[in-house]
Image: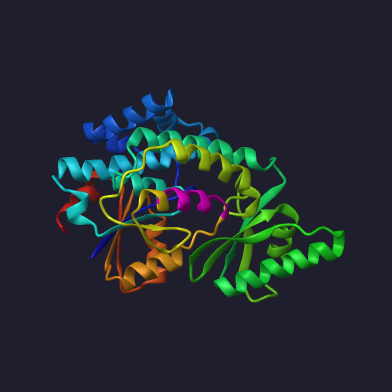
Amino acid sequence: MRAFIFPGQGSQAVGMGKALADASPVAREVFGEVDEALGQHLFRLMIDGPADELTLTQNAQPAIMANAIATLRVLEREGNVRLADTADFVAGHSLGEYSALCAAQAFDLSTTAHLLKLRGLAMQAAVPVGEGAMAALLGADLDKAHAIAAAAVEAVAADTGQTLVCTVANDNDPSQVVLSGHRAPVERAVALAKDMGAKRGVLLPVSAPFHCPLMQPAADAMAAALTDAHVAAPLVPVYANVHAAPIAAPDAIRTALVDQVTGMVRWRESVLAMVEAGVTQFVEFGGKVLSPMVKRIAPDAEAISVVTMDDVEALLAKI
């Protein structure tokens, strides 16, 4: 069995999609459709930068999606491949869940681009710049990460009398868990990490504290947007981040996407659940971020990254 998987924020880079667009009119069509839907020259920004503008959440999210879907469409159209015949499940990391839903035709491309633009803007606006932070705990499993987060909140409360937020945002793989919340306890968690058994803690260069309760205003914005958005039943089930389980009903998809804004990305559990369901091959479209995580979670699984035309052709030889 095979799962198609789609990367999240952090996989963007200036130049993304250029080689694919140069090689394939199918890819150019996808980038043009996203530009038209958003009314901006997003693909030009993807190719030329500047990097700081591409990294803005409202640009990075639709750009990463466009690159992933362009790669998939090249496989489908030029390789004469149907997703429903080739993949048993789809899944994506954070914003990648929208890419997965687009791939499985639960959303059309224009709707996906609009939703991700709104999601990026709403997430950025939810917490004033500087008030929140995120940190990766390396060499820490989920239980250890929860303990470090709780200790950081207690330490800051003891110092200041304030009970602030620091929670697990991403359970990525057995050796990497990400925390999110108010800056003070997240920074304290980094300081506590090594003494509490993690290899180390590292503050992440992000502009907002994603996937924590501070994102509630963004969740409310997405709830309103998704109420009005057309959601079809996906061609194959999607493993939802917040459930680490497959969903297919449109209303369940809407609810999961809203809950995902403040909830933990259960990527490690999602991969394990797909393996338990029989998946032996994971194919990542448009990035090389999730494939190494898959190998750390499920060493016996095959993990393939598809970014270039050569990658597309290599995958076609396997399916």
Q: Position of residue 88 (x, y in %)?
A: 25, 60
Q: Which residues are magenta?
A: 253-262
Quarter occupied by residue 89: bottom left
Say which of 220 and 98 sits in front.
Answer: 220
Q: In the picture, which quadrant includes the N terminus?
A: bottom left
Say which of 200 and 272 sits in front.
Answer: 272
Left or right: residue 204 versus residue 246 is: right
Image position of 305 with respect to 103: above or below: below
Q: Position of residue 138 (x, y in %)?
A: 57, 67
Q: Residue at x 13, y 45 (%)?
A: 80
Q: Residue at x 58, y 74 (%)?
A: 143
Q: Main secondary structure of the magenta part?
A: helix
Left or right: residue 313 versus residue 19 is: left
Q: Position of residue 286 (x, y in %)?
A: 35, 47
| Camera sees residue 208 | no
Q: Residue at x 51, y 70 (%)?
A: 175
| Camera sees residue 71 | yes
Quarter occupied by residue 40: top left
Residue 288 is one of the magenta-drawn residues: no
Quarter occupied by residue 279: bottom left
Q: Position of residue 297 (x, y in %)?
A: 41, 70
Image position of 195 with respect to 252: above or below: below
Q: In the picture, which quadrant includes the C terminus?
A: bottom left
Image position of 48 with respect to 123: above or below: above
Left or right: residue 158 versus residue 73 is: right
Q: Residue at x 56, y 45 (%)?
A: 219
